[in-house]
Image: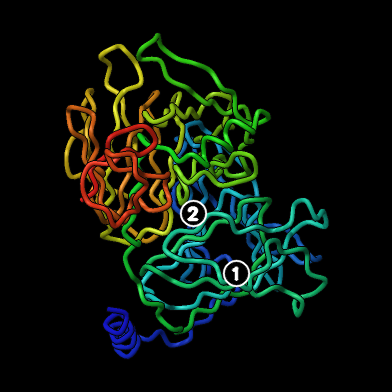
Amino acid sequence: MKKIFTLLAMALMAIGAQAQTTYDFSGLTAADFTVNSAGSKGTYTMDEQKGPSVNYTSTTGENMVVTVKGVTFEYKNGSSSKDGHKDNVIKTSPDFIQLDSKNFYIKLDNLNIGDVITIYCSSKSDDESKATIFGTLEGCTADSENPEKVIKAANLESYTACKFHATETSVAIRETNNGVRISKIVVEAGSVAPVEPHAAQAWDFTSISDADITNLEADTENWEKSTQGEAPNDYIRYSNKFVVAKVADGNNKTNLEANGQALALADGLAFGRYNNKINADNIRIDINKRIVLNGSDVLLYVDDCKAGDKIKIRFSTASSNSEERGFNVDNATPTNAMTVDKTEVEFTVSENGSVIFKTTAGVNLYAVAVNTDLPEEIADGISVLKAETVEGNGVIYNLQGQRVDANYRGVVIKNGHKVVIK
């Protein structure tokens, strides 16, 4: 399979290799700028020389689109639902263009997958806390050699070359801290990395390992233990006590750990909160029952997905009321409808990257699978798992009480529950 992907990559390079194209932002004139109705042209004096500038003048809250020498700069007002006016959000000097806000997206179209985009840039500020950070990428990935932050350069020769690799034919790159100075952007052909599907993987939140329980029990700083319900149907719940602050672009992201160890229950998944901090009790682990995403705008991240991957998810409302609850999903399209009752929905990934599930209100989460089947549920409470999903997730015994491994087939006892390994 890898050989096929490699041959395909070589064919794409041979057919559509991007000749080097340089977008030079020195010596700009007003004629180099095309501005939509949300903006207007002006002038600004920088480095003792007067040059063209652009103002944001929208009275409708629309995004401003500015094209300069073939590159599009889209300004998304931080309060895009409101009217606004900001002078000189784009400034120029004899040597560079300055995007004077973190609300700009740098956009390039008509690329070939694998093209390398190099942005020669500098922070606009001497304050290191306001150093340039490229934090939002669409249709591309950042080169591993790029610095985490770009400080202000002493001169043009000291500008930092930040590289990005196109994974789509259109890319958008956003500076998410304070704005940026750019002297030029260079696009050239690069190697096309083979695009392989996400590895088949399934998570069963109705069963938890003994090791996870031990770590949750020990970590009283980050997890609060309580008993829910009434006997004989009571169960143990661990609720998060930790709080995760939102980051500069609004969201946050954390893996589930306890006692300094990753929880096998959700290893490979991440959780967050949309445009807010993760508060205490936003994430609940109901032992051998489910994970509860408690509240609206709680995020579940499935990372490293490829276009065309299939993600299946089993969930239900966490409310006793019959209200509609579920997820809004970024970067994936459902193939069947969500319902109020416990339901399974399959999604097809739209583009390479993360798929983010955002709760509309509290949701019970039972299982997630990528490019494989969900663990089966049977009405009498006996789950059916594929053998590869059992190994390493709790000791298993046959019905005679003998310890067995994942090569065993049939009904077993795993974490106090009957499971069929097939």
Disc 2 to disc 1: CB gap under 8 Å: no
Above or below, 94 relative to 378:
below
Residue in view at x 54 percent, y 23 percent: 281
Mark 2 neighbour class, 10 Å CA radius: few under 14, some 14 to 19, many 20 or more: some
Viewer-proximal residue, 151 or 97? 151
Secondary structure type for disc 1: loop
Query: Mark 1 highlights which residue?
Result: 29
Query: Mark 2 highlights which residue?
Result: 74
Mark seen at residue 53: none
Viewer-proximal residue, 286 or 293? 286
**Amino acid at dot 1:** Thr
Q: Position of residue 52 (x, y in %)?
A: 63, 62
Viewer-proximal residue, 403 or 141? 403
Judged left or right of residue 70, residue 405 is: left
**Amino acid at dot 2:** Glu
Above or below, 238 relative to 205:
above
Q: Position of residue 172 (x, y in %)?
A: 47, 60
- Scheme of image coloration: rainbow
Q: CA distance from mark 2 to mark 1?
A: 19 Å
The nearer-to-camera label among 2 and 1 is: 2
Residue in view at x 36 percent, y 77 percent: 194
Residue in view at x 55 percent, y 47 percent: 262
Q: Position of residue 349 (x, y in %)?
A: 29, 54
Q: Quadrant of the N terminus?
A: bottom left
Mark 1 neighbour class, 10 Å CA radius: few under 14, some 14 to 19, many 20 or more: some
Judged left or right of residue 107, residue 122 is: right
Which comes sooner in the sequence, label 2 or label 1?
A: 1
Q: Position of residue 356 (x, y in %)?
A: 40, 44
Judged left or right of residue 11, residue 88 is: right
Secondary structure type for disc 2: strand
Residue 199 falls in which quadrant of the image? bottom left
Residue 29 falls in which quadrant of the image? bottom right
